[in-house]
Amino acid sequence: MSRRAKIFTGLGLYLAGIVVLVLLTGSAGKNEEFQPQNEFKLEPWVDLPGPFDINKAVVYVIAAAVLTVFAMIYIARRMQDRPNRVQTLVETVYTVMRDNITRNNMDATMAARWFPFIATLFLFIWISNLIGYIPLPTNTEHPVHIFGLEIPALAIYAATANLSVPLVLALVVFIAYTVEGLRAKGPIGYLKALVPKGVTGGMAVFIFVLELISNVLRLISLSVRLFANILAGHLIILFMAGGIAVLMGIAAIGFLTLPLGVILFIFEVGLVATLQAFIFATLASIYFGGAVAHDH
């Protein structure tokens, strides 16, 4: 039997087993109480005056910031002439941030000035995405009772899956590159640079308005891309890891979807978490370079 035949035979037996389990176990009916979106609901953990309540998003943001600072300081103090594997990995990431992200989109002077900001942005988003895939006791809606204690259930959550966090990062980038462009060209020169040379009359006005709108939409381009990808990844993992089985009340479906959930989890951790941080930092660098470029 060929390898392809073995694979299809195995899949057929696996699906047949699922069908048999469904027929044997039946269905408990649709679960109306389980609300998957509540996994991302922000309930106050510590009530403070005004809008300063502490919830899990705040805790994850602080954790990502502390881990970013601690990791870089710890590694920087232990650099060696003969690098070990950790140092080799760090130097590779550093080279990617410096050459591929920053220097490719800015001139040497500007790259040197803004590299610390871009690198910090990349590392913070990257670490925030990664810790978002670590199961932690953050699900207060479905607590676990152990020896009389009510302990939050394990769940995965990322601060970047909350739109407010990517939006704030995008606002910081937007303000920073706008200030840099105004400082390099002056207010009039910066606005003039929005229109390509040689375009005059009504077309110039149309393109000017279009470019202004395009600049504002960069906030959406940066924030929603990061937010939507991380949120969608977490939701898909939730559904594949058992959410669909709970919603439909058919436990046997969990045997079918769980392997897919594991594969998607590995894919999200191995690729998406890093890719989204890279895209955010790269787009920020492009916007910085474009803000001071003399040619449109």
Image (cartoon, grey):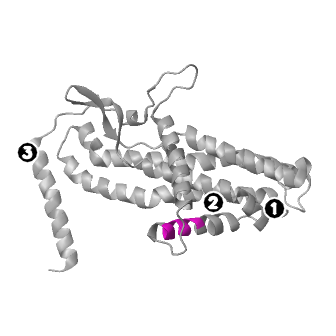
**Label 1 close to label 2 by CB (< 8 Å):** no
Q: Is residue 93 left or right of residue 242?
A: right
Q: CB atoms at circles 3 and 1 under 8 Å apart?
A: no
Q: Picture coordinates of residue 75 (x, y %)? A: 52, 60
Location of mark 3 (residue) = 24
Label 3 to label 1: alpha-carbon separation? 68 Å
Q: Quadrant of the N terminus?
A: bottom left
Residue sitting farthest toward the left: 24
Q: Is 293 within the magenta?
A: no
Circle on res. 293: 1
Using a 10 Å C-alpha cutoff, classify the residue at mark 1 as few (fewer than 14 neighbours), some (14 to 19) or many (20 or more).
some
Question: Residue at image x 21%, y 47%?
Answer: 253
Tell me which corner region of the image, top left, top right, bottom left or bottom right, holds residue 289. bottom right
Q: Position of residue 252 (x, y in %)?
A: 17, 47
Mark sitting earlier along the chain (1/2): 2
Quadrant location of residue 108?
bottom right
Between the residue at mark 1 and the residue at mark 2, the CA separation in whole angstroms equals: 16 Å
Judge whether residue 89 is colored magenta: yes
Q: State the extent of the magenta-drawn residues as a range.
A: 87-94
Q: Position of residue 55 (x, y in %)?
A: 47, 31
Q: Residue 29: which disc?
A: none
Category of crowding for the residue at label 3, using alpha-carbon neighbours closer than 10 angstroms: few (below 14), some (14–19), many (at least 20):
few
Q: Amino acid at mark 2?
A: Thr
Q: Is 136 drawn above or below residue 225 in the view shown?
A: above
Q: Residue at x 52, y 40 (%)?
A: 62
| SS for dot 1 | loop
3D distance between C-alphas at marks 3 and 2: 53 Å
| Secondary structure of residue under mark 3 | helix
183 horizontally vs 130: left or right = right
Main SS category, magenta section:
helix
Q: Mark 2 = which residue?
A: 282
Q: Position of residue 265 (x, y in %)?
A: 36, 54
